[in-house]
Amino acid sequence: MDRHIAHFDLDAFFVSVECLKNSRLKGRPLLVGGTGDRGVVAACSYEARKFGIHSAMPIRLARRLCPEAIIIRGDMESYSKYSHLITEIMQDTVPLFEKASIDEFYIDLSGMDKFFGCSLFARELKKKVLKESGLPVSYALASNKLISKVATNEIKPNGQLEIDFGKEKSFLAPLSIAKLPGIGKETAYKLVRRGVETIHTLSEIPMEMLATMLGKNGIDLWRKANGLDESPIIPYREQKSISTERTFDTDTINLRFLHAELVRMTESIGFELRRQDKLTGCLTVKLRYSNFDTVVKQKTIDYTNADHLLLQTAQETFDKLYDRRLLIRLLGIRFTRLIPGNYQIKLYEDTQENIRLYQSIDSIKRQFGEKAIFRAVGAGRVQQKPARGA
């Protein structure tokens, strides 16, 4: 059976939500992000993009490019609310979908061409999203996720496009290699140095040569350049929490050890949050004393997945919770109120340097494992080992 995959992407999502809240912002060059000079742009309106402004750009530079730009600090509560609204529309309307991020969805319409018609269904869904949420959305319909995503990016804002079966490679051919998912700045530099600037040229390079040049990524890029993608739709299931806990071999009152363990655990599930492109809005610390009394304390926080903010909240919560000075046998930490999102989206007041630091740390962890890099204070846990099977 032929696959029919639609990619729905809300247009300038944060900006669109802000314009719903304040109609006077419509049509204006609008930036959502840090209000300080060292902050970064989390999102910008299409009017602002005409000045060369883009996400992750330093606010200071964006101000120089467009002095009349309106700068608003983001409101993750509102963005989360509207994201959940769109998700509910998808759940009520489509047979199978994947929530790829806070503002984009892949929808599997395979088989529907025999009934309602995939093209008509997608058009009607676009109208329904706008009518029920007030938010504009663009979509593309194609034979796989790769083509539908690339096509959606080509026709935003408020666009729609269908790539016919068999036309995937010809659609990609004239596009810049930068339009192909998986090609970052370093890979693009290597390719451009060799005269590879379009996806057509990339697709003509033998797979073996790309594998020699770029390793496993070369094989993946060859397949993408030729319009091939069998990746499945991952059915949406809302994850309620991410947590971890440890029961110690020996009950302890060693605050230095407990602090080190708290750091290690928070870093571990903080990395898991970022790996899944999620943010948390609530942190809970759990303690079990030697007499088996169990206590918990939770703290509602601004949505984030940044270790330095999570660690600060975890330590403050632990300090307020641990008031008996009894021996502890178990320590746990849990993140709840999870929403889709990534690091750059949340840290409106953070600096470009911090963002790059987190990206580098996570890149190392993905390549070599979580234990490849960690805060020195977390090494203090070697003083005491967690119980087997904990």
Image: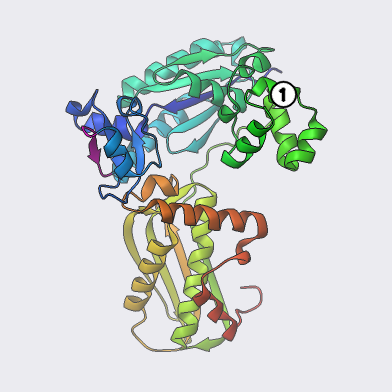
At x 23%, y 25%, the residue is 26
Query: What colour scheme does the image use?
Result: rainbow
| Residue 17 left/right relative to 353 | left
Residue with the mark numbered 1: 203
Left or right: where 24 falls relative to 40: left
Q: Is residue 305 visible?
A: no
Q: Quadrant of residue 20?
A: top left
Label 1 amino acid?
A: Ser
Using the image as rendered, state which of residue 295 and residue 377 is in the foreground.
Answer: 377
Which of 20/379 is in front?
A: 379
Magenta region: which residues?
67-73
- Residue at 47 percent across and 73 percent down: it is 262
Q: Where is residue 4? Give x, y as percent.
A: 61, 19
Residue depicted at 58% across the width and 24% down the height: 176
Q: Residue at x 38, y 62 (%)?
A: 309
Residue 218 sits above or below residue 266 on the image: above
Q: Quadrant of the N terminus?
A: top right
Q: How far across and how far down the image is residue 165, in percent?
A: 66, 12
Q: Indicate yes or no whether the magenta region holds residue 72.
A: yes
